[in-house]
Amino acid sequence: MGTKLNVGVIGYGWAATAHIAAINATRQGHVTAVWSSRDLDAGELSTRHGGAIRVHRDLESLLADPAIDVVDITSYPSQHRDQAVAAARAGKHIILEKPMANSPAEVADIVAAAEAAGVKGCVCFECRFSSQFQATKAVVDEGLLGRLHYGEVDYYHGIGPWYGQYRWNTKRAEGGSALLTAGCHALDALLMVMGGEVESVSSLGTKSSAEVFRPYEYDTTSVTIVRFRDGAVGKTAAVVDCLQPYYFHTHLVGSAGSLLDDRFHSVRLKADKGHWSRIAMKMLDSGDVSDHPYQAQFQAFFDAIEAGTDMPLTSFREAARTFAVIFAADESAARGGQPVRPG
Ligand SMILES: NC(=O)c1ccc[n+]([C@@H]2O[C@H](COP(=O)([O-])OP(=O)(O)OC[C@H]3O[C@@H](n4cnc5c(N)ncnc54)[C@H](O)[C@@H]3O)[C@@H](O)[C@H]2O)c1
């Protein structure tokens, strides 16, 4: 029997409800506290989620509680930096929802505070733990596609008034950009499967003329071309102003075959090139947080805390590399598509 980890959740919105269920379903974690700006009822929360949950209105009191081992930050993006830095200084390990923060300086502050305090971090790029991307990465790692020279991973999900976070997502200070607010999952998946170091990125932005997307203070569609140091090229479209079903599109092209979503062809298997072969995988096909693979990710994080190591795939350092590419892409779009080297 390993360590029990008491988790305090910061912010109690939609993501928080999915996180609590996922944390409580891990071997070690259970949620024992929630901080909210609202006056929540501790009895009601405890009944809804199971276990005894204390409610804090004051973040300092939650962070000062020595019984809390881990905090889980699910608040507005503009609050992430200050809350994560305070949590690190209080010696708490941190689960942090995406975006880590909306500026390079804020992300750097978070990484530095965690490293100075010796606490571990987990960023909610949970798609890396999805059945779809675990299987896709395995196909690549088994060499079935040969050496990848081109990859596309695209995010199509209309975030209009029908989606809860629209209420704050339209603001530049919160949503940030099409990549920061949601397309980050696709760019992060592209970087995971392509593997190499990024040399430069070029990006262009635009937006829908549909009335429902008019309140957005930033371009809600962007397309980013990534040049890797080994010469490979990648592309991510981040489209949060589309009117269509949720679609996480993947197309990888290598020297021994191709993969398209849940289909592939490999010359290594001597299969018929006239048809795709299918891979059984659970697809990322919904923007509903209750369907996100948080449990596998949080289990990996808690196992890493127990082992005293950085977690695989979504540690603060690893996720910060993806955000460096995103900030470079947004800078490129602001400069009309000029290539920018990630900082
Ligand atoms: N990784 C993912 O796939 C994923 C999915 C959804 C959200 N998120 C992220 O999670 C974070 C929170 O997003 P969310 O979807 O939970 O948004 P949300 O609007 O439900 O909650 C955001 C914040 O608003 C607060 N809040 C909610 N209703 C409120 C009210 N009536 N009055 C005052 N405060 C209220 C919540 O406590 C929370 O701090 C964001 O950083 C978002 O980007 C990530």
Image (spheres, rainbow, N blue to C red):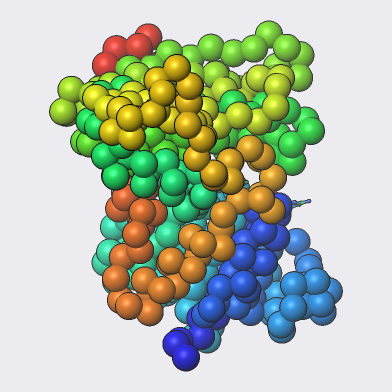
Q: Is residue 11 left or right of residue 71?
A: right
Res. 176 visible in picture:
no
Q: Is residue 93 left or right of residue 296?
A: left
Q: Relative to residue 125, is residue 309 depicted above or below?
A: below
- At 74% from the left and 78% from the top, the residue drawn is 50
- At 71% from the left and 84% from the top, the residue drawn is 52
* Viewer-closest of 137 and 12: 137
- At 40% from the left and 20% from the top, the residue drawn is 273
- Percent coordinates x, y for residue 93 in the rendering: 42, 70
Res. 255 visible in picture:
yes
* Viewer-closest of 88 and 277: 277
- Percent coordinates x, y for residue 234 in the rendering: 33, 24
- Percent coordinates x, y for residue 265 in the rendering: 39, 28
Q: Is residue 40 left or right of residue 242?
A: right
Considering every residue shown, the one lying at the far left of the view is 230
- At 77% from the left and 30% from the top, the residue drawn is 161
Q: Relative to residue 203, is residue 264 depicted above or below?
A: below
* Figure quadrant of the C terminus: top left
- Percent coordinates x, y for residue 175 in the rendering: 57, 34
Classify residue 264 by image quadrant.
top left
* Viewer-closest of 51 and 84: 51
Classify residue 248 by image quadrant.
top right
Considering every residue shown, the one lying at the far bottom of the view is 1
